[in-house]
Amino acid sequence: MLKFIPTLSHKSLEFRVFSREINESTILAVNLSNLVESGELAARETVYPCRVCGKIYSKKSSMYTHLRLCGKEPKFNCVLCGRRFKYKHRLQSHLTSNLHSQGF
C-alpha cells in the first residue's frame, strides 16, 4: 500500500511515498512529478534531491546543508520543556519566545 504525505518545506512542496517495496529512485520520481503537476517546480528546472530522504532542493548548496543533518538526532535541548532542535539559533529563538515567559 502506498501512502502519500504532503508537507511544506522552505521553498518547495514535498511528497514522501511510504512503502516497503519502493526504492529511492521511485520516491524521487513521485516527488518530481507531483512538484511539476502542482506548479511548484518548472519542468526544466534543475533539482537536487537528498539521497537519504528524497527531499528536493532547487540549489545544490541547500541540499548539502540539509544533508549534513539529515537523519541525525537534534543535539540542542530546551532545559525547560525538553523540546529538541538541530540548530542552536532555533533553540535560542525558542527560549526567547513568549512561550516560556508565560509559564507554558
Image (cartoon, rainbow, N blue to C red):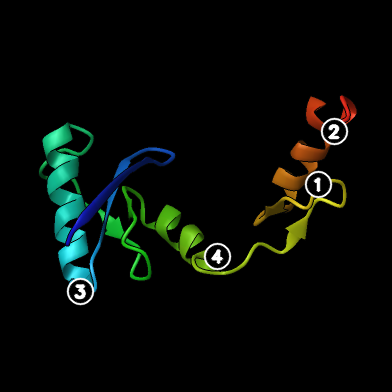
Horizontal side, residue 5 vs residue 82: left or right: left
What quarter of the picture does the N terminus occupy?
A: bottom left
| Kind of residue indicated by mark 3 | Asn
Secondary element type, mark 1: loop
Secondary structure under the numbered disc 2 in the rendered image: helix
Please report contact status of discs 1 and 2: CB closer than 8 Å, yes or no.
yes
Q: Which mark is residue 100?
A: 2
Q: CA distance from mark 3 to mark 1?
A: 38 Å
Viewer-closest of 49 and 8: 8
**Which is more toward the observer, 64 or 7?**
7
Q: Position of residue 75 (x, y in %)?
A: 72, 64
Using the numbered discs, state the Cα–Cα distance from disc 4 to disc 3 in whole angstroms. 22 Å
Q: CA distance from mark 4 to mark 1?
A: 23 Å
Q: Earlier in the sequence, mark 3 or mark 1?
A: 3
Callout 1: few (<14), some (14-19), or many (20+) C-alpha neighbours within 10 Å? few
Q: Residue at 87% across / 46% down in the picture?
A: 80
Q: Quadrant of residue 84?
A: bottom right
The total of numbered circles placed on residues is 4
Q: Nearer the viewer, residue 63 or 29?
A: 29
Residue 37 drawn at (x, y percent): 11, 37
Report the Cα–Cα distance between label 2 and label 4: 27 Å
| Type of the residue with mark 2 | His
First in sequence: mark 4 vs mark 1:
4
Q: Which residue is mark 3?
A: 23
- Secondary structure under tag 3 reads loop
Residue beneath the point at 20% across and 61% down: 28
